[in-house]
Amino acid sequence: MNASDDRSPEAFRTRIEAATQMESVLGVGGRPNCLVIDEIDGAPTAAINVLLGILNRKGPQEADQGGTAVAAGGRRRRAEGGLLTRPIICICNDQFTPSLRQLKQQALLLHVPPTLPSRLVQRLQEISLQHGMRSDPGALVALCEKTDNDIRACINTLQFLYGRGRRELSVKAVQTTHVGLKDQRKGLFSVWQEVFQLPRTQRRIVGQDLMLPAHALLLSNGDKGSLTLASQRFYHILRVTTSAGEHEKVVQGLFDNFLRLRLRDSSLSTVCCALDWLAFDDLLEQAAHRGQSFQLLCYLPFVPAAFHVLFASSHVPRITFPSSQQEAQTRMSQTRNHIQTLVSGMAPTTRSRATPQALVLDTLCLLLDVLAPKLRPVSTQLYSAHEKQQLSCLVGTMLAYSLTYHQERTPDGQYLYKLEPNVEEVCRFPELPARKPLTYQAKQLIAREIEMEKMRRAEALAWARSGPQVDQGSSGPASLWTDSGEKGTRQPVPRNHEQRLEHIMTRATVQEQPERDFFGRVVIRKVAVPSREVEAPQKDADEWRMGVAVGRSEVWFRFNEGVSNAVRRSLYIRDLL
């Protein structure tokens, strides 16, 4: 079966099960069918998953050990076809197709080498003799070279010439006919190989012309005779790169591999010329796509031809698949993410003067030196005034640029503090030696001071929004003190929980309602007016109101309404007091 004919998973499953469950009924003893799937690399991923599902079916014994629903699954296994006990042969042209990735892990890979020209010439000569057509080995060798040792194309060409009445095969007839050129497109590695390597010298056979045919050079028959062998190679590379169809990948492979070749030019003039050709290619693509001048695209295949003239040699090149562009794009994406994270967390005053370009080119390189002071790994209480000021400036700078140190655990179990965001990756080249890092204790101290400074600023901001007016003439921690009315003296502002208690006490006083009887009438109680000597002080009244607000206890709490799915239990305030 051909895998590229039926691309739907249902049809693929039906044909595979029909082929694997049937046997031959002719002859003595039934033999199972052998399923051969051609062009498996053209099948979609869903069809490959169907094939993997058939291969991974469990037998009755494995199913009995693996689960309890054996009786119900036996009928289902019979309906599905049971365990596969025969091999399936799959044929593909490209084993690196993404859809074959999981199938290759369970398959036995057999690489079939290309047909040797000598064996193919011998076989074609036998076929020609059986059909009464005379052919010399030189003509058959030319036919094999023209079709790239394609057996089907060679036989079809012989059949076409025989049907036209030719009973004798010559080299001229092979080179002038246009039959046999079914698929002249080559892979990327083949294109790079032909660009960087000179063709092997061939022995001249009697009656064979070493000149390439005109159709292989994209020329007319009249222009072919004036070309030298070097010019033929130039036009051959031009035709190969034009038929490849992936110009960007071809040029990217040339860029990644041409500096790994054996260069005999000590002045590097060929390298400079190659770079000029690459710049010319970029200008052509930019003018073609941005300016809608698509007629310029016909000049792009000349870049690989120029590389062939500059770097082609008889040595076998070591070619690798190009990856520098993908690595550069990944690096650029990471750098942009770091810069965006850094800019989004900056203070507004710092962000107004720091553009992304200025950060990368000017600020970050010097900022890393600022963030690495000489700090003693001791407690801050033992620091001198100069060291405390230096630490305070460092913390302020890191908060202005939204930088801090985060603790991470390495795979071997060690803990390290890393700068977050890691701007060192933005402004440091990988080949250069790293700066002398801070010690673990110094980074831990800086991270702790940054967190404490964040808490101080958050508390000061919350107090400035909700608390009483702060003295405008003071700044810093001293701004949390207010004047007491007396000249030259100050009193501390009540703490957060005391402020909340005062608000609760005031609200409880305002919400105090008169006592009413059953019918809603106000109950008037006579209270003896105490004398001034026994009048309770104002402080006791405040404490009484506070006790009413929070339940006449030193314990106070805040209740947030919500739903909890945890275990519930009836609990009263008297149980907590």
Image: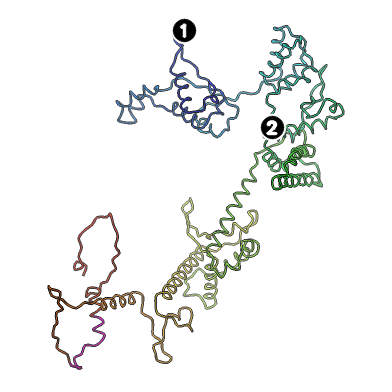
The residue carrying pointer 2 sits among few (fewer than 14), some (14 to 19) or many (20 or more) residues within 10 Å by Cα, namely few
Residue type marked 1: Leu
Q: Residue at x 54, y 68 (%)?
A: 348
Separation (CA) of disc 2 from disc 1: 47 Å
- Disc 2 to disc 1: CB gap under 8 Å: no
Mark 2 or mark 1, whichever is nearer to me: 1
**Residue span colored magenta:** 531-543
Residue at the disc numbered 2: 190
Q: Residue at x 31, y 76 (%)?
A: 503
Mark 2: which secondary structure?
helix
Q: Residue at the right extreme?
A: 226
Q: Quick one: label 2 or label 1, which is nearer the N terminus?
A: 1
Q: Position of residue 458 (x, y in %)?
A: 44, 70
Q: Position of residue 489 (x, y in %)?
A: 41, 89
Is residue 540 one of those drawn in magenta? yes
Left or right: 129 as drawn, with respect to 366: right
Q: Position of residue 522 (x, y in %)?
A: 16, 78
Considering depth in this image, is 72 or 280 the residue closer to the camera? 280
Considering depth in this image, is 54 or 300 the residue closer to the camera? 300
**In the rendered image of this protein, does residue 323 appear above or below residue 141?**
below
Residue 26 image label: 1
Mark 1: which secondary structure?
loop
Q: Quadrant of the C terminus?
A: bottom left
**In the rendered image of this protein, does residue 54 appear above or below residue 426?**
above
The residue carrying pointer 1 sits among few (fewer than 14), some (14 to 19) or many (20 or more) residues within 10 Å by Cα, namely few
Considering depth in this image, is 42 or 449 the residue closer to the camera? 42
